Amino acid sequence: MTEEAESERLARGRARLKEITGQSGEKVMAALADIAPDFARYIFEFGYGDVYSRPGLDLRTRMLATVAGLVALGHAQRELEVHIGSALNVGATREEVVETIMQMALYAGFPAALDALLIAKDVFAARDGL
């Protein structure tokens, strides 16, 4: 891949990440700068520049699928918090987030869904200024 193409992927990824997360995504990426800057670049380029920028799904649907996947993992609380907020940023409702999490109880188990619901509760409260 040419340097120009890599630069375009990086720019596209940064723009998509900002669209989805606001400033929180940049903060996470900046936190990686001193320990794993290449990893941050991979997330920008591949994750957001390539995958999240594909035309097949709208961002709301992508984020609800991401929330579902993180619930199913059962060990990505920090990411789940960020992506629940991101789902809300791109148009998902609180009810859709809750229903997505509850659906995962069938596949990820009740403990994973319970943990995720409590994370969602915290995200919602933070948005309400509570």
Image: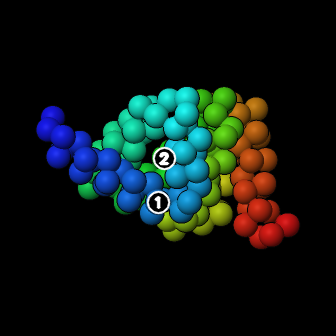
Please, which colouring scheme is shown?
Answer: rainbow
Residue lying farthest right? Answer: 130
Q: Residue at x 25, y 47 (%)?
A: 7
Whether residue 56 sits left or right of residue 87 in the image: it is left
Could you give the CA–CA distance between mark 1 and mark 2, rounded to whole angstroms?
19 Å
Whether residue 119 sits left or right of residue 40 in the image: it is right
Whether residue 40 sits left or right of residue 109 in the image: it is left
Q: Residue at x 34, y 39 (%)?
A: 46
Q: Quadrant of residue 34?
A: top right
Determine which of the numbered discs, if any, sits on residue 65 in the image: 2
Residue bearing the label numbered 1: 18
Which x, y percent locates residue 28? 58, 45
Pick the quarter of the image with the C terminus: bottom right
Is the C-beta separation of discs 1 and 2 under 8 Å? Answer: no
Determine which of the numbered discs, if any, sits on residue 102 in the image: none
Which x, y percent locates residue 76? 64, 34
Task: Inspect the image, locate mark 1, and give the three-letter code of the amino acid beneath it.
Answer: Lys
Task: Inspect the image, locate mark 2, and give the three-letter code of the amino acid beneath it.
Answer: Ala
104, 2: nearer the viewer: 2
Q: Quadrant of residue 45?
A: top left
Whether residue 78 sits left or right of residue 45 in the image: it is right
Pick the quarter of the image with the N terminus: top left
Residue 127 makes an appearance in the image: yes
Kindly state the secondary structure of the residue where label 2 is placed. Answer: helix
Badge 1: residue crowd in 10 Å (few <14, some 14–19, many ≥20): some
Which x, y percent locates residue 3? 18, 40
Residue 87 makes an appearance in the image: no
